[in-house]
Every structure is written in structure tokens, then in C-alpha cells.
Image: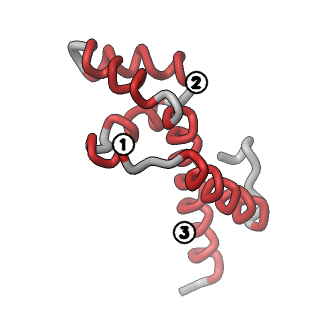
Amino acid sequence: MKTNDLRKRKTSYYRWQKLRLEALLAVVQRKYEFIEIIRRSKTEKDVIERVVPRFNISLRQAHYLLGLELRQWGALKYEELQKEYERVVRYCQILGLNDKKL
């Protein structure tokens, strides 16, 4: 595999991991509020219109969160997510990625 291909794959992977973890960290401490929004909304579009501004997340992040199964929500721990996020941010820095490139 070429070095450029490997770098692109790593870059793509860590970009997504960073976005995923930012979404989880934004919601995990208020997960019951997030779940209540889902319960009270009639459509997925309604949910997204409510959670994007309330939790300051992107559409892609909102779709990711809506794809999680309820049992996955119970296992989320803020401290563990924060440690993983910090690790991913370090890798992003090593790869030369900054928020503007994400």
C-alpha cells in the first residue's frame, strides 16, 4: 500500500473518530434529555431540528447519534469518552489535522 493511501485512510478514520466522540461528549451527560427529545418527536427530521442547535452538533453527528441503539446509551461513560477523545485529538495533531481541515 502506498504511503499516501495509508495517510488518507488514517486521516479519514481519525476525522470521523473525532467527530463521533465530540457528538457523544456533547450528549452523554444529558442523554436523558436527548432520549426525551426523540420520544416527543414525530419524525427523524423533527429530532434533528431540535438536537442540532440544542447540543451544538452537526447534521452528520446527529444522524450518528440517532443510529445508536438504546442499550448502547446505557454503557456510555463520560470519563472514558473524554480519554478516548484526547487520544484521538493527539493523533489528529500528529497527522497535521486541525479543526479547519475536519
- Report the coloring of the rendering: secondary structure
The residue labelled by disc 3 is: 9
Which one is closest to the eye, mark 1 or mark 3? 1
Please state which of residues 17 and 84 is positioned toward the viewer in this rendering: 84
5 on left or right of 69: right
Please state which of residues 8 and 17 is positioned toward the viewer in this rendering: 17
Answer above or below: position of 18 versus 48. below
Estimate the x, y position of residue 65 in percent, counting from the top left: 39, 38
| Three-letter residue code for mark 3 | Arg
Please state which of residues 70 and 12 is positioned toward the viewer in this rendering: 70
Q: What element carries label 3?
A: helix
N-terminal-most mark, 1 or 3 = 3
Distance in Å between CA atoms under marks 1 and 3: 28 Å
The residue labelled by disc 2 is: 56
Estimate the x, y position of residue 70 in percent, counting from the top left: 27, 40
Distance in Å between CA atoms under marks 2 and 1: 19 Å
Answer above or below: position of 102 versus 4. above
The residue carrying pointer 1 sits among few (fewer than 14), some (14 to 19) or many (20 or more) residues within 10 Å by Cα, namely some
The residue labelled by disc 1 is: 73
76 on left or right of 45: right
Q: How many marks?
A: 3
Which residue lies at the image location 27% right of the left edge and 14% below the top edge? 41
